[in-house]
Amino acid sequence: MAEKPETADTAVRKAAGALHRSPRLRLALLLAAPLTWLVVAYLGSLAVLFLSGLWTTDPFTSDIVRTWTLDNFEALFTTDVYRQVMLRSVGVALGVTVLCVVVAFPIAFYTARVARPRWRPLLVVAILTPLWASYLVKAYAWRVMLAEGGLLDWLLKPFGLDGPGYGLTATVLVLTYLWLPYMILPIHAGLERVPDSLLDASADLGARTWRTLRTVLLPMILPSVAAGSVFTFSLSLGDYIAVQIVGGKTQLIGNLVYSNITLDLPLAAALGTVPVVVIVLYLLAVRRTGALSSL
């Protein structure tokens, strides 16, 4: 009975010694649980999604027929409606990303380079504050503002203009508002990392403000802009709630997936793989800018 603690203690010491001598073993044990979760829960679900897209449904009973076919994926590229929706979804995601860059850059420049240092943390908190509010609350608030006779109509009426109402423009505006903080924060961080000496050197060499901005500042924060675009592009591409609230009759990929999930699950799965493939291609494109290291 007295030898058992000794044996257990010896085993623990041997295991500790083995871990101490083998950093790779320590790393493998440390990453085993999260990697298992990633492979099973995330990559596994994507694999199931893709495989489900290779099935079909019985036209009479709507039951899933588990026979392998590429009909669903072929329909995505041969049917005009699906092609238009996919192109529209990518266009909306790109449009939201461009608008976020245009709006986010001056805000981030002020918070990172112009505002007094003691005010900068408070400004960052102010930028993050909209993220604490409910997604639905913000979307429905925009629905009220965009409605006929709403706030935007009231503001534009003195100029003889009307608000955009519900539709594609409203969807882009709402998505831009929702994902704007995800663009401001990376640009803010990138601007903070720019040494003041570079801007001073540019001014000493006779470069004016716009030349310094174009040739010194923008190339240095390009990875930060690309990092922010990963969020704005991917979140806009997969969104389906905002377009249902303010999009009117506009259809995006998310809407088609949602509407087909109960009627034609294999087709919905095939549609669901489109954003995944587009986002992977987008990540491969922005990887060359160093954006992934800035996330």
Image: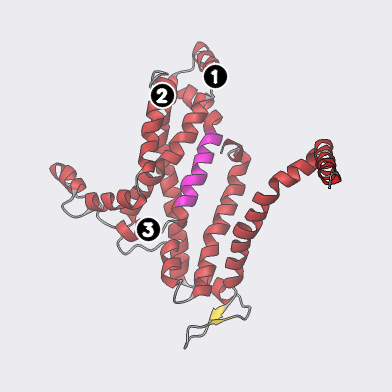
Residue under label 2, please give it.
Answer: 120
- Secondary element at tag 2: helix
Pair 3/1: label in front: 3
**What's the residue type where badge 1 is placed?**
Pro
**Closer mark to the observer between disc 2 and disc 1:** 2
225 falls in the magenta region: yes
State the extent of the magenta-drawn residues as a range. 222-235
Mark 2 or mark 1, which has the lower sequence index? 2
Which one is nearer the viewer's eye here, 60 or 221? 60
**Cα gap from disc 3 to disc 2, whole angstroms:** 33 Å
Figure check: 115 above or below 20: above
Foreground pick, 278 / 54: 54
Above or below, comparing residue 11 to residue 114 in the picture: below
Q: Amino acid at mark 2?
A: Arg
Residue underneath mark 1: 195
User: For the point 66% across and 57% down, which residue is it?
Assistant: 39
* Residue with the mark numbered 3: 241
The stretch drawn in magenta includes residue 37: no
Task: Give the left or right position of residue 244, taking residue 160 as reference.
Answer: right
Picture coordinates of residue 262 (x, y %)?
44, 74
